Image (cartoon, rainbow, N blue to C red):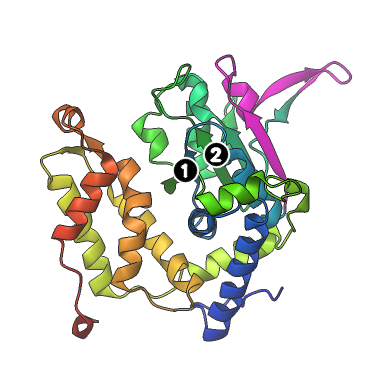
Amino acid sequence: MTTLTTAPTPTERDIVEFRRLHQALGDAVESAVHGKRAVIDLVLVATFAGGHVLLEDVPGTGKTTLARAVARALGGEHRRLQFTPDLLPSDVTGTSVFDPRDSQVRFRPGPVFSNVVLADEINRAAAKTQSALLEVMEEHTVTVDGVTHPVPAPFLVIATQNPVDLDGTYRLPEAQLDRFLIKTSLGYPDAEHEIEVLRPGSTAGRIDDVRTISTPDEIAAVAASLATLHVADPILRYVREIGVAIRHDERVRLGASTRGLRALVRCLQVYAAARGRHYVIPADVHQLVEPVLAHRTVLTRDAVLTGHTQSSVVAEVLETVAPPQPDQG
């Protein structure tokens, strides 16, 4: 696989190469996760945008399989961490230990010191343990006993969680949710793909058969290049207008912050390049607003009681904001 150049902005050749890389990664993951290409593409968007992914669904729909398949396709070191009620923060980040051989205290790194961290059933751990991820997901460092330790680059957390109305789950706080660039779900496969999964000899769920397509260095280089992809001012104004409209909706108690809108712009850059374009169009915004902003939107109690959801409110608000016209760009 050809590595992209390090030009200030991606060239046409860079975009072509990235589209091939994106397609190859998606094909590799789809060999283990059948019929969910749209979700796979969202996870890859977050990967190259430098963010993290939260997968929410009922048990048995393939959340962990997807996370493991993505980790294998991306290459590099990956670790899986099963979140349980008795898990401690030090089990996540690491801790200082005394070495009796030389009477020195040394830092023993935890599972987060990997390129890809699979945080399985993250909402089964208590809030104190969940908070152990706040620093590392935002700053890519871990501070223990006053000493800061950087994690490898690139760094990606793919977390899975069960719906909060299931037994033994804890709601993720808003600060934790805001650390995830994208939140999405797999859902049950359609009839054709579910039959294919059930068929004896199917490759569904076989992680060992997923090909490694890339390396950490390549992922980091590509992500740096795509971060400079052009986004026209009318598109930026459109993104801000959507954010403001969500914040001002009477059903919303807390809307997406400026950080959330910046996250949307980063995802738009990657999404456009994956479709062979070096520019963003309004249709890209429509595709990504819900998975990027809905989980950052907190509804009022009355809105929840009357049956509104974060996704439905964001979708309704989106329809009220007029997209920029071609002659504006």
Local crowd size for mark 2, using a 10 Å CA cut-off: few (<14), some (14–19), many (≥20): some
Q: Quadrant of residue 294?
A: top left
Position of 296 compared to 142: left or right? left
Q: In the rendering, at what x and y percent does residue 242 appear?
A: 21, 57
Secondary element at image label 1 = loop
Position of 149 compared to 273: left or right? right
Q: Amino acid at mark 2?
A: Thr
Q: Is residue 92 visible?
A: yes
User: Which residue is drawn at the image coordinates 23% and 43% (left, top)?
Assistant: 255
Q: Is residue 104 magenta?
A: yes
Q: Is residue 138 visible?
A: no
Local crowd size for mark 1, using a 10 Å CA cut-off: few (<14), some (14–19), many (≥20): some
Q: Which residue is mark 2?
A: 61
The single residue placed furthest to the left in the displayed view is 250
Badge number at residue 187: 1
State yes or no: discs 1 and 2 in contact (Cβ < 8 Å). yes
Give the spatial CA distance, label 1 vs label 2.
Answer: 6 Å
Q: Is residue 257 magenta?
A: no
The single residue placed furthest to the right in the displayed view is 101
Badge number at residue 221: none
Image height of 303 relative to 283, above or below: above
Q: Earlier in the sequence, mark 1 or mark 2?
A: 2
Magenta residues, start to end = 76-105
User: Which residue is drawn at the image coordinates 48% and 20% (left, top)?
Assistant: 128
Image height of 2 relative to 192, above or below: below
